[in-house]
Structures are given as C-alpha cells and as structure tokens.
C-alpha cells in the first residue's frame, strides 16, 4: 500500500528558514543545513529500504494560487491565504507493508533538527494518509 506523508508550514516558517526578519527569529544557516541533512538522510534511508516512492518540497505560500468557483465562474486568489496560516509544505510518498509502518516512518520526522531558540509558534505535526488506487478505495 502507498501512503502520503504530508508536511505543513506557514509563510512565517518559510521566512524563518530563508533568513527573513518577521514575527519569528530567522534560523541560522547552520541550523537550516542541519535540517536539510536530516531530511536527506531520512529520504535516503527510505530509498535503501525500498519504501521511497516520491517526495517534493513546495515553494513558499506566497507563490501559491487557489482556484475556486463563484456563481459558476473561476475565482483565483493569490497566496498566502487569510483563512489559514498553514499550507502543504512538502510530501513524501512511501510504499510499505502497513499503516503502522507508514506512521513509524512519519514519526521519525519528530526528530527534525531546529534551533533551540526557535519559536515554532505551534505544535509540529505531519499527516499520513493512504493513497486511493481508485474510487473503491476512498473509504478504506
């Protein structure tokens, strides 16, 4: 079975990682490098076990567009969106033996390095969801 591990972040998180001053203290480049090394090792371990399918980081929310419909016409809104602070920041798709194994893999991300002084401003989390192979899989 394939599972998607979804990582979330806000525009403020992206600003911290890229060194921009804002509501939170910017990360030191050495701390960003530690985080990137951790993520690289995490991905490589999944490649080695044969569980890695695909993964991508996404650009900052300011580069996002949301397309909705109003009275039958498309409405385009540029990000970040006032309705929510957090957006999908990246994802990894794994193929593994069970939901428990996918959860175990995702739980390893709790060890992602960050500066001791980082004000994360919220509890950290990722979501894990099975991928549907077709309409019959929507309600596993």
Image (cartoon, rainbow, N blue to C red):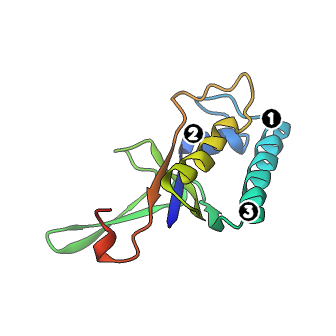
What's the residue at 59%, 47% (across, down)? 106
Secondary structure at badge 3 equals helix
What's the residue at 74%, 50% (across, down)? 39
Secondary structure at badge 2 equals helix
Q: Is residue 66 above or below residue 88?
A: below
Q: Marks 3 and 2, Cα distance to the nearest angstrom?
A: 34 Å
Residue 2 x %, y %: 52, 66
Q: Which residue is mark 3?
A: 49
Which mark sits nearer the N-terminus, 1 or 3?
1
Q: Is residue 62 above or below residue 76?
A: above
Could you say which disc has been placed on residue 28 in the image? 1
Residue 32 placement, left or right of 61 = right
Circles 2 and 1 in contact, beta carbons < 8 Å: no
* Label 3, residues with CA under 10 Å away: few <14, some 14-19, many ≥20: few
Q: Nearer the viewer, mark 1 or mark 3?
A: 3
Q: Which residue is mark 2?
A: 12
């Amino acid at each position: 079975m394939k599972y998607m591990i979804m990582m979330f972040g806000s525009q403020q998180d992206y600003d911290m990682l890229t060194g921009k001053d804002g509501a939170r203290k910017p990360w030191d480049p050495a701390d960003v490098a530690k985080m990137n090394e951790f993520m690289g090792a995490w991905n490589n371990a999944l490649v080695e076990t044969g569980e890695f399918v695909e993964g991508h980081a996404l650009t900052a929310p300011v580069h996002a567009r949301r397309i909705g419909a109003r009275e039958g016409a498309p409405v385009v809104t540029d990000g970040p969106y006032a309705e929510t602070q957090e957006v999908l920041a990246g994802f990894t798709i794994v193929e593994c033996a069970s939901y428990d194994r996918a959860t175990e893999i995702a739980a390893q991300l709790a060890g992602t390095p960050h500066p001791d002084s980082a004000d994360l401003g919220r509890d950290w989390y990722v979501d894990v969801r099975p991928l549907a192979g077709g309409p019959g899989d929507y309600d596993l």
